[in-house]
Amino acid sequence: MDVKLKLLRFNPETDTEAHFEEYTVEAEPMDRLLDVLHKVKWYQDGTLAMRRSCAHAICGSDAMVINGENALACKVLVKDLAQPITVEPIRGLPVIKDFVVDMEPFFAGYKAVKPWLITDPHEHEPARERIQSPEERAVFDDTTKCILCAACTTSCPIFWSDEGYVGPAAIVNAHRFIFDSRDSGARERLEILSQADGAFKCRTAFNCTAACPRGIKVTKAIQEVKRAALFGTV
Amino acid sequence: MATVEDIYRKHKPRAFKADRRPSRSEVWWWFFMRISGIILVFLVLIHLYVMHLVGEGVERVNFAFVAERWDNVGWKTFDWVLLVLALLHGSNGLRIIIDDYVRRDGVRTAIKGALYAVTTVLMIMGTAVIATFDPSLGS
Ligand code: FES
């Protein structure tokens, strides 16, 4: 079948503004959008810039605005998309070229919440693994699924207007450690997320939950973090 | 050759930075908005009913009506609580919207300054009227 594409192109060397360009590609209905973009890049226009790596929805490189919704190009099938398929870079971050955006503000929020295990300094280093019951694990299971694709954060209207907002992805990754029974850094992280640009800037628009390609209940996680920050309970 | 620096010249994104000593005030403002919101639903509905729907509604509101109403300390308290909660809830909401959407530092400070000034003046005026109201002025 012929697939019609409308790609939002921007070349900083020649363009002052982004503009749509149209392409037609021969593809199978079961092809992923990523395959179709590859065909454009490999056989029609080598200047098309995009990020992708695994092509299996696990590295989180290829989040794009596809027919108006944030998704991974490697996770949507051509047959499920209305034509012409419009593809734009994710919103709220400066576009470097075509679908490549500057992810720095996104990762700044991620780094700020200390997304690593913080152990209790008074605890003797255990000689065995830290035991965790299935129930304890279930509390934060959902937020372990994040692949840092930025689909949630760049679907957030608050982030669009202010990249200084820590963003849903950072809160999700904070949640993953705050509610981990082996971790002792909850206080530090909740303190950081209590500041003006932290979790309380969330207005529960729910765009993040709709955008997550991993099906993480992002808004729910944010609300749990807010509750923990407000009442000091984990 | 355009670089990220060139792109930044047009739009340098702000990025989240953890404050050295993070303040928790935003947490309490957030909590205040939920609680005051719930209370205001009832206060505003009662206010609307009493002032605009009963009898001839707002047509009957004159000095005598207010004097009689504020003879009762309960209604005075009711009106003052409504004033404080509505004013704080409303202006805090505006502050949050300004923080979200006004991106130029100077402009934001100016608009927020004006907002705080208006809020303070309205709060003082409203409180003064309720506290110093003298029904004998009408006669
Ligand atoms: S290419 Fe890795 S997530 Fe799509």
Image: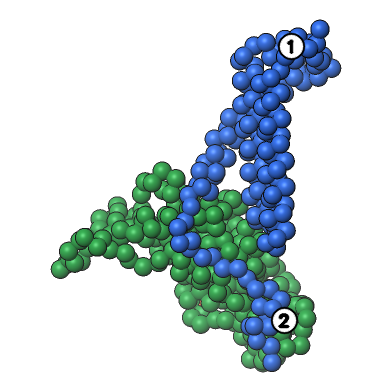
Chain colours: A green, B blue
Of the numbered discs in the image, which one, if any, rests on residue A165?
A: none
Residue A2: where, in percent of width, then height?
A: 71, 80
* Residue at the disc numbered 1: B135
Q: How many marks?
A: 2
Quarter residue B126 falls in: top right
Label 2 marks which chain's residue? A
Residue displayed at 68% across by 55% down: B109
Please name whichever residue, A42 or B56, is drawn nearer the observer in this view of the structure. Answer: B56
Which chain contains the residue that carries disc 1?
B
User: As displayed, is residue A20 above or below residue A43?
Assistant: above
Helix, strand, or loop for circle 2? loop
Q: Amino acid at mark 1?
A: Pro
Quadrant into which the N terminus of chain B falls: bottom right
Look at the picture and state if A121 lies above or below A187. Answer: below
- Residue located 71% across and 30% down the image: B125
Residue A91: x %, y % from top left: 65, 68
Which residue does the image show at 58% across and 29% down from the upper left?
B39
Q: Which residue is mark 2?
A: A10
Question: Which quarter of the rendering shows the C terminus of chain B?
Answer: top right
Q: Is residue B127 above or below residue A82?
A: above
Q: Amino acid at mark 2?
A: Phe
The answer to whether one can see residue A214 in this image is: no
* Apparent side of residue A154 relative to residue B125 in the rendered image (left or right): left
Which residue ends up furthest to the left in the rendered image?
A127
Q: Is residue A189 left or right of residue B71?
A: left
- Tag 1–tag 2 contact (CB < 8 Å): no
User: Residue at left 71%, top 23%?
Assistant: B129
